[in-house]
Image: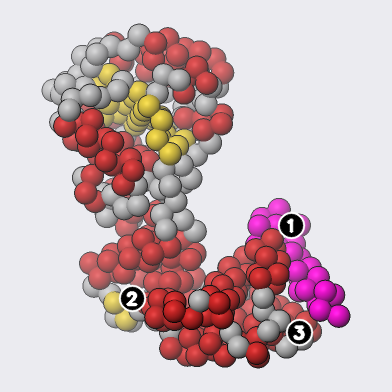
Amino acid sequence: MGYNRTHMTKSVQNEQAFLALYRKYRPEAFKDMRGQEHVVSVLESAVKQDKIAHAYLFAGSRGTGKTSMARILARALGTSEKDIYEMDAASNRGIDEVRELREGVATLPFDSTYKFYIIDEAHALTRDAWGAFLKTLEEPPKHAIFVLATTDPDRIPETIVSRCQVFQFKKPSHEILKSLAVDVAKKEGAKLSGAGAELIALMGEGSFRDTLGILQKVLTVSKDATLTEEEVARVVGAPSSKTVNDFLSAFARRDVDAALKSFHEAIQAGSDAKTFTLLSITKVRGILLLRFAPSLADELSEQFGPDDVAFLKKLSGQDGAAINATALSELLTALIEMSRAPISSIPLELALMRIAAVAR
């Protein structure tokens, strides 16, 4: 592997050269982190009080800011780039790589108080590699700090976890992702409509990185200064708002034939079944909220365009009686099952058939 700083940061340098938005707007300080206040408060306090642990475990789904937080902690401790080492355990997972890491840890930092090691996808290390790494965690040199980042903490040996301070990173809320998309679009010279930001945030599915990746695709393809929901949908292959509304109108009439027709027309036009279902769920949720909590109308007006709000209000009344909590539960089940279905459209088709059967 040639375990050294140059090798370990090669992939990072390549990504920076590309200037992907998630790199360009990566948080640089604790104050820039969104949605992880519970982690920021503890780490900031630890830095101020000089109570730094020698090992941390950052656990959370992809794109939640784990490696960004690690680099922010390193900088807060005054660690120079020469003394920050990043290792992708998914590619460098064996005992030889960890032995090389141990040899590097033994040497003093170049010009910092600490040598700071960030091990991404840590759960991918082999059992032998963990055995070798455990010896380093048991008796670490005073100048070494380790951050293990993982999307699968259950695969980290308990002997390792017990020697780390563990932080669970939360998925950012929908509103946080929406705000991020609007802010970055503005910095890039574009105006993102509320409904367009809503769609980007939905498709980001709880990931800062995925949200900015989708925004970058839209900014790259679109030539318009103002990015509407229709423009975003066209670029990312999402169904139009009208198509989803036609589906829900048929749903409300218990017209399974028409609902399936709208769904299949969207799929044939290039829409993704999961995205179609996700957008449908979002609107069904809006319908139910307007029905049972009309005081939330202003909040929903920020999420949907005026035409959609009028449509949702209509179906929140007697016209949409068939759209209820049971229907929403069926749609949610279909969304979850899509990732493992042999044909992605089957779960939603089955959900419609079950709903129709219950109504008879």
Residue topped by disc 1: 341
Which corner quadrant holds the C terminus? bottom right
Identify the mark at residue 192; answer none if there is no mark.
Answer: 2
Residue 31, above or below 91: below
Q: Nearer the viewer, mark 2 or mark 3?
A: 3
Q: Residues within 10 Å of mark 1 (few under 14, many from 20)?
A: few
- The tag earlier along the polypeptide, 3 or 1, is 3
Question: Residue 276 sits in which quadrant?
Answer: bottom right
**Whole-Å distance between the Cαs marked 2 and 3?**
35 Å
Q: Position of residue 165 (x, y in %)?
A: 38, 27
Quadrant of residue 85 within the rendered picture:
top left
Spatial distance from mark 3 to mark 1, Cα to Cα?
25 Å
Could you say where residue 197 lies in the image, as x and y percent from the top left?
39, 72
Whole-percent x, y for residue 126 in the image: 55, 22
What residue appears at the point 70 percent right and 57 percent down from the top-left corner? 337
Q: How many marks?
A: 3
Q: CA distance from mark 2 to mark 1?
A: 34 Å
**Amino acid type of the residue that numbered disc 2 sits on in the rendered structure:** Leu
Q: In this image, 156 relative to 102: left or right?
A: right
